[in-house]
């Protein structure tokens, strides 16, 4: 019996194939079945092996298209709208996965006015496997950039591709294989993890299909049960008049400032459960029929929001921005009621500061900050665990989301990950070295590997004695300096103290593009801010030198961010002066300095060493 030709998910309409290298096309059919392929006015023949696998190698092509590709055997398949250009594999955790829809408040006008059929994108669906490398990924499809399709693109990848196309004119294909929250070891092969027996034993635990099935079925039960009891006991949902309705009488509710989180504490302990907040606002006549968006900043942990008793939006966890469209006719001239049901599951509940809380009309906005009435609907214990996050286990994503892509040639890799490894920064250099080697081995080339360094995050502090985030940034810097053909996009000035997913993905993409142009295209450009090279001690001062070509400093009134330490290893903020291409640092209380650090904190607010091209220096420490 004849079996129809089957193609991998990446070989589909709208795909981009890598230019200037042989093109591998592969798939499955009946054993020994003969397959003919037509592409660019040429015909090719191949046959499936005894296992039904087949592949054919087409000659390399220059930039071009659109082409069609036709497959004929017992059935025929036609692939349309194929381009030849440059393909980049984009991977990592949530800051790579973060979609354009999350950054529309910052870049909405630009995104809403941009279409480009020469930029194509495919998102690999989440899947994992612990038994071995898989042959294909779940169903997915290539799409080109329009204002509508872009909403689901990785924001980092989008801005990277846009910059690359504008600089090169070469079509850009983006394969986004990223998963939020994942550690580096999830993206590494079983062979690569041989130096880590504990991680390998974790893999062996997950090689039981019965275990995975049972944990997947039962693992979320505590959380679901917690939610059921919460809803059953929440007075705001179960009183005769729901607390979201305007006619409910909230006269006896307490009052708080929206950004004062003391309501969610009992001394030093959080109080978890369901909280209700209500605020009356005045809408001027004429605004009630205009389009409006309600911004509720960022809320810990989840929320449902109502306007005049009508539900307008919900978010199930703390990180996404709350940008809720208010349907026409919901608002009215005069008094209006905004109600928020806040669900706190574990930590301290709050409305995060320095985020937007307002209703925005086309030409006017109304602040929602200030006084709100509030009441606890029910108090709950800390929510139960959510089961095993199998996507975070070693090897699983490599097998299911990287290995199946290896036949599709790429120009290089862009990588934004590290947040989930900050607590284990000491092993990150080895893990990432293994990962890079694994991936290059799959593609049989030392392809460019471009790393986004962790952005600034958490409470601002120009210096911390201990910072896992600074340590991991230092590892990322070391990787870029010691591993062949790697580049570092420094993002120490692109973060937000109150958001692990900062909005400025545009400059991240542009800095990655600089590294790509330098490493992958051989352009003679400066892609780096000042890079530390050496230092020498002169009395009570240390003179710091930087790599030639990166040491054209942007002048500042006062250099900030440096610290020095003596023999005791305790760092103190230092004064610093620029002279030519060197920086001299000192602290009057340290007579015999031995070490220097720069921008050494989770969020080194105020560090200001840049070159004249506007690129920041990476945080660093002398050895």
Image: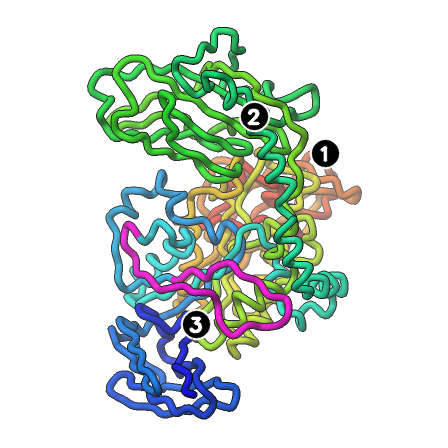
Q: Quadrant of residue 244?
A: top left
Judged left or right of residue 303, residue 151 is left
Judged left or right of residue 526, residue 456 is right
> Disc 2 and disc 1: Cα gap in Å?
52 Å
- Which sits earlier in the primary sequence, circle 2 or circle 3? 2
Q: Secondary structure at mark 1?
A: loop
Residue at screen point 48% across, 7% down: 251
Task: Decide whether residue 129 is among the magenta residues.
Answer: yes
Label disc, if present, on residue 410 of the rendered structure: 3
Graded by Cα atoms within 10 Å as few (under 14), some (14 to 19) or many (20 or more), the crowding at tag 3 reads many
> Disc 2 and disc 3: Cα gap in Å?
49 Å
Out of 470 and 594, give the one closest to the viewer.
470
Q: Are marks 2 and 3 in contact (CB under 8 Å)?
A: no
Q: Residue furthest top?
A: 251
Query: Which marked residue is nearer to the observer: mark 3 or mark 1?
Result: 3
> Residue 465's spot in the image, x, y percent?
70, 39
Task: Decide whether residue 146 is among the magenta residues.
Answer: yes
> Residue 403's spot in the image, x, y percent?
54, 71
Out of 214 and 586, give the one closest to the viewer.
214
Magenta part of the protein: which range? 122-148
Query: Which marked residue is nearer to the observer: mark 2 or mark 1?
Result: 2
**Vertical position of residue 539 compared to residue 165: above or below:** above
Residue 425 is at least partly visible in this image: yes
Q: Secondary structure at mark 3?
A: loop
Give the residue pinned by disc 1. 589
Query: Which marked residue is nearer to the observer: mark 2 or mark 3?
Result: 2
Q: Quadrant of the C terminus?
A: bottom right
Residue at screen point 62% across, 53% down: 216
Give the residue pinned by disc 2. 274
Q: Quadrant of the N terminus?
A: bottom left
Out of 116 and 317, give the one closest to the viewer.
317
């Amino acid at each position: 019996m004849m079996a129809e030709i089957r193609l991998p998910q990446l070989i589909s309409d709208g795909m981009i194939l890598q230019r200037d290298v042989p093109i591998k096309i592969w798939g499955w059919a009946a054993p020994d079945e003969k397959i003919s392929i037509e592409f660019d006015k040429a015909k090719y023949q191949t046959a499936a092996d005894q296992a039904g696998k087949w592949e054919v190698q087409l000659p390399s092509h220059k930039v071009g298209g659109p082409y069609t590709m036709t497959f004929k055997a017992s059935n025929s398949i036609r692939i349309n709208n194929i381009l030849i250009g440059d393909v980049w594999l984009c991977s990592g955790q949530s800051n790579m996965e973060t979609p354009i829809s999350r950054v529309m408040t910052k870049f909405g006008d630009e995104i809403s006015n941009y279409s480009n059929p020469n930029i194509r994108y495919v998102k690999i669906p989440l899947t994992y496997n612990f038994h071995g490398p898989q042959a294909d990924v779940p169903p997915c499809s290539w799409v080109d950039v329009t204002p509508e399709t872009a909403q689901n693109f990785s924001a980092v990848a989008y801005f990277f591709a846009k910059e690359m196309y504008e600089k090169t004119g070469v079509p850009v294909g983006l394969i986004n294989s990223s998963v939020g929250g994942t550690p580096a070891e999830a993206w590494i092969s079983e062979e690569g993890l041989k130096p880590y027996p504990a991680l390998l034993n974790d893999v062996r635990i997950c090689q039981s299909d019965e275990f995975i099935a049972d944990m997947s079925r039962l693992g979320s039960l505590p959380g679901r049960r917690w939610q059921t009891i919460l809803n059953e006991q929440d007075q705001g949902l179960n009183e005769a008049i729901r607390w979201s309705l305007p006619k409910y009488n909230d006269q006896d509710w307490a009052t708080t400032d929206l950004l004062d989180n003391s309501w969610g504490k009992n001394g030093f302990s959080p109080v978890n459960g369901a909280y209700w907040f209500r605020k009356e606002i005045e809408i001027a006549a004429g605004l009630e029929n205009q389009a409006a968006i309600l911004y509720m900043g960022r809320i810990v942990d989840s929320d449902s929001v109502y306007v005049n008793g009508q539900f307008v939006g919900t978010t199930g966890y703390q990180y996404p921005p709350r940008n809720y469209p208010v349907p026409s006719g919901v608002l009215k001239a005069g008094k209006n009621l905004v109600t928020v049901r806040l669900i706190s599951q574990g930590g301290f509940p709050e409305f995060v500061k320095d985020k937007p809380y307002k209703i925005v009309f086309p030409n006017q906005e109304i602040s929602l900050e200030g006084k709100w009435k509030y009441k606890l609907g029910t108090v709950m214990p800390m929510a139960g665990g959510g089961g095993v996050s199998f996507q975070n286990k070693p090897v699983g994503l490599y097998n299911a989301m990287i290995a199946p892509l290896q036949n599709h040639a790429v120009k290089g890799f862009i990588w934004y990950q590290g947040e989930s490894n900050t607590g284990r920064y000491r092993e990150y250099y080895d893990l990432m070295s293994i990962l890079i080697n694994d991936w290059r081995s799959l593609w049989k080339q030392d392809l460019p590997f471009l790393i986004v360094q962790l952005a600034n995050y958490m409470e601002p502090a120009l210096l911390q004695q201990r910072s896992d985030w600074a340590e991991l940034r230092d590892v990322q810097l070391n990787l870029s300096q010691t591993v062949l053909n790697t580049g570092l996009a420094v993002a120490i000035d692109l973060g937000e103290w109150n958001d692990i997913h900062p909005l400025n993905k545009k400059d991240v993409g542009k800095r990655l593009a600089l590294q790509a142009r330098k490493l992958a295209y051989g352009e003679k450009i400066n892609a780096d801010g000042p890079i530390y090279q050496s230092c020498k001690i002169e009395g009570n001062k240390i003179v710091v030198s930087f790599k030639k070509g990166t040491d054209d400093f942007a002048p500042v009134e006062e250099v900030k961010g440096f610290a020095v330490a003596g023999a005791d290893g305790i760092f103190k903020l230092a004064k610093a002066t620029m002279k030519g291409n060197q920086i001299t640092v000192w602290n009057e209380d340290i007579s015999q300095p031995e070490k220097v650090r720069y921008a050494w904190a989770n969020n080194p607010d105020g560090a200001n060493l840049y070159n004249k091209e506007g690129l920041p220096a990476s945080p660093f420490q002398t050895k």
